[in-house]
Amino acid sequence: MHNKRILLITLRADIGGGPRHVDSIYQNLQKTFDIFIASPVENPFGIKWNNQLAESNHFLKLPHRKFLIKDFLIFVSFVKGKKINIIHAHGRGAGIYARLLKIFLPKLKVIYTLHGFLIESFPFWRKQVAIFIERFLNLFTTIFVNISKNERALCVKNKIYGEEKSVVIYNGIMDEFFEGNNKNVIREKLGLPQDKFIAISITRFDPIKNVKAFVQIADLLKTEDSIFFVLIGDGEEMENIKALIKENHLKNILLTGFVNKPIDYLMSSDIYLSTSISEGLPYSVIEALMCGKPVIASNVIGNNELVFEEYNGFLFELSALSNAADKILRLKNDFNLYKSLSANSRKRYIDYFTEDKMILQLKSLYERFSE
């Protein structure tokens, strides 16, 4: 076991890219470093980490997306008692805990991954507050990890930090694609129509993910009998989305709710459709690239670093949803273009977004600050 002790902290351990990222780090580097985790105890990841690490006293329970003084004091005691060398904080809430801790433990190395600097969607006053807080906490940050080049450029533009104090490490996922998968067999197993061109989205149902726009695009194409939409996920806006589908009498959209293994649905689809207002570097789009799916995505940070126009998909402005509908029709009707974009999606995944590449870079970063 490596003698350096690393604490991974996140204030979310439910469904989402941030918790999934933390789990990937832990599973891949637990034999290289002595890894601790601080997080809420919630499904699916928090319960899993608690079960795996609590007995060895390598797990600390924290509240879901809250900063409480009593929990912070417990956190300080835990880090001091375990002689933690490096903290890697994931997300804004975790970043506050970790960086305030450095005030009390100045020798501690604090690595901070934002998982999306989403201020562009904030009202003016909230944006200014967020920038002020990040500039202040920069004083207690050893290095920032950005998950996209555009996220890094936004942080530098807003003077959160200088470029020399950050690195870009793309999110990466394990390759689950296999050439022999039979789309028709998977569709039959899932009860999906065999003769339709299927557009899919796998997402949380919250305002930032803008699921309403996905439904509106389905509405624009409801007279196209050959096109079908599959929407996978759950969240606070589920009832609103159900009501919108009912209100528009849409028969061309399947709402599955939460699915344990969405990769099967992804492999059975034809294209991926993202309508997010803001992103970090979305895992669902990376999964689509892994499966060789052309992607039609909103032109926002995160999406526009995964999707290149007419190379592996298309970008559209959220003010012009009809443009997204037109791109879906174009891909359905142009098989040669579809094949080209599909091959390029798979290539882009292999070149940049494998789990092995991500883990290798993070291992190197940890070793750099372990010296």
Image: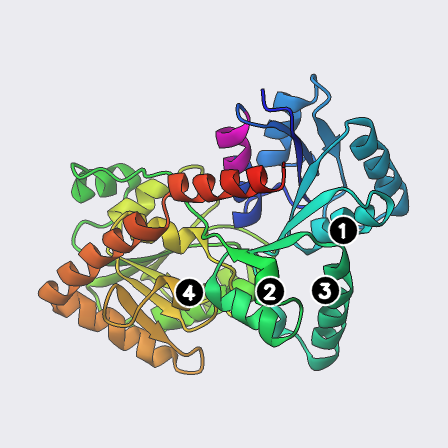
Cα–Cα span, label 2 and label 4: 13 Å
Q: Separation of disc 1 and disc 2 at Cα?
A: 17 Å
User: Where in the figure is residue 361, as x and y percent of width and height?
Assistant: 47, 44
Circles 1 and 4 in contact, beta carbons < 8 Å:
no
Residue in front for this viewpoint, 237 or 40: 40
Q: Residue at x 73, y 74 (%)?
A: 126
Please state which of the two labelled residues, at mark 2 or mark 3, is closer to the viewer.
3
Disc 1 to disc 4, C-alpha distance:
29 Å
Pointer 1 with pointer 2, Cβ within 8 A? no
Q: How many marks?
A: 4
Q: Amino acid at mark 4?
A: Asn
Residue position for label 4 = 303
User: Magenta region: which residues?
Assistant: 24-30
Q: Position of residue 293 (x, y in %)?
A: 26, 55
| Mark linked to residue 134 | 3
First reached walking from the N terminus: tag 1 or tag 2: 1
The foreground one among 256 and 166 is 166
Residue 100, x across and y down, in percent:
81, 51
Q: Answer whether residue 192 is visible to the viewer in this image.
A: no
Q: Which residue is mark 2?
A: 117
Q: Is residue 43 left or right of residue 271?
A: right
Q: Main secondary structure of the magenta part?
A: helix
**Which of disc 4 and disc 1 is earlier in sequence?**
1
**Front residue of 359 and 116:** 359
344 up-or-down from 308: above or below = above
Asked if disc 3 and disc 1 are in contact, CB closer than 8 Å, the reply is no
Q: Which mark is residue 99?
A: 1
356 to the left or right of 234: left
**Which sits earlier in the primary sequence, circle 2 or circle 4?**
2
Q: Tags 3 and 4 in contact by the CB under 8 Å rule?
A: no
SS class of the residue under badge 2?
loop
Could you tell me which secondary element the residue under label 4 belongs to? helix
